[in-house]
Image (cartoon, helix red, strand yellow):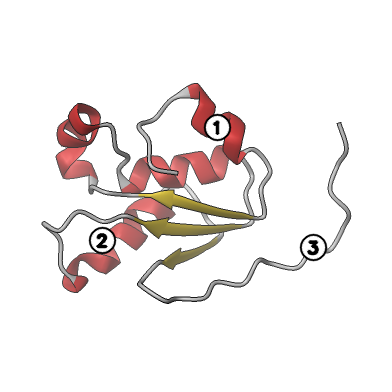
Amino acid sequence: MDTRLCDNVFALADGVDLLVIESTFLSTEKDLADTYGHLTAAQAGRVAAECNIRRLVLTHFSERYSTDDEPRFLAEAAEHYTGDIVLARDLLRVPVPKRTTPPATS
């Protein structure tokens, strides 16, 4: 997802096994995220936690950050989501976690 925080983010992410979601900014730039329609790493973590996802993949980082900032993205998302968090890089392969129980049906 490449979006600002809205109801549809939560609807689309609800119960997924693997959530690939942008985290363009850190919380210190929350105003920029709001202005340009992006998420912070903390907001992405909140979506993952509230939607009970199984693995979170953060992507779409602003060029203002370097690889030295990666631990900050992980830490912010982990403030809300305690599951597996992956920082996406070009050509990275991320396996979908195996299910231990069948998915619930609606």
Residue that carries the numbered disc 2 in the rendered image: 72
Amino acid type at image mark 1: Phe
In the rendered structure, the answer to whether residue 61 lies left or right of residue 14 reads left
Q: Give the mark nearest the N terminus, 2 or 3.
A: 2
- The residue located at (86%, 42%) in the rendering is 104
Residue 86 appears at what percent x and percent y?
45, 67
Residue 68 appears at what percent x and percent y?
17, 72
In the rendered structure, the answer to whether residue 97 lies left or right of residue 36 reads right
What crowding class fits label 1: few (fewer than 14 Cα within 10 Å), some (14-19), or many (20 or more)? Answer: some
Residue that carries the numbered disc 1 in the rendered image: 10
Secondary structure, mark 3, is loop
**From this viewpoint, which residue is outermost toward the top?**
7
Query: Which numbered tag is attached to residue 66?
Result: none
Tally of numbered discs: 3
Cα–Cα gap, marks 2 and 3: 29 Å
Secondary structure, mark 1, is helix
Residue 105 appears at what percent x and percent y?
88, 38
Cα–Cα gap, marks 1 and 2: 23 Å
Residue that carries the numbered disc 3 in the rendered image: 99
Quadrant into which the N terminus falls:
top left
Amino acid type at image mark 3: Arg
Tell me the quarter of the picture where residue 75 sits: bottom left
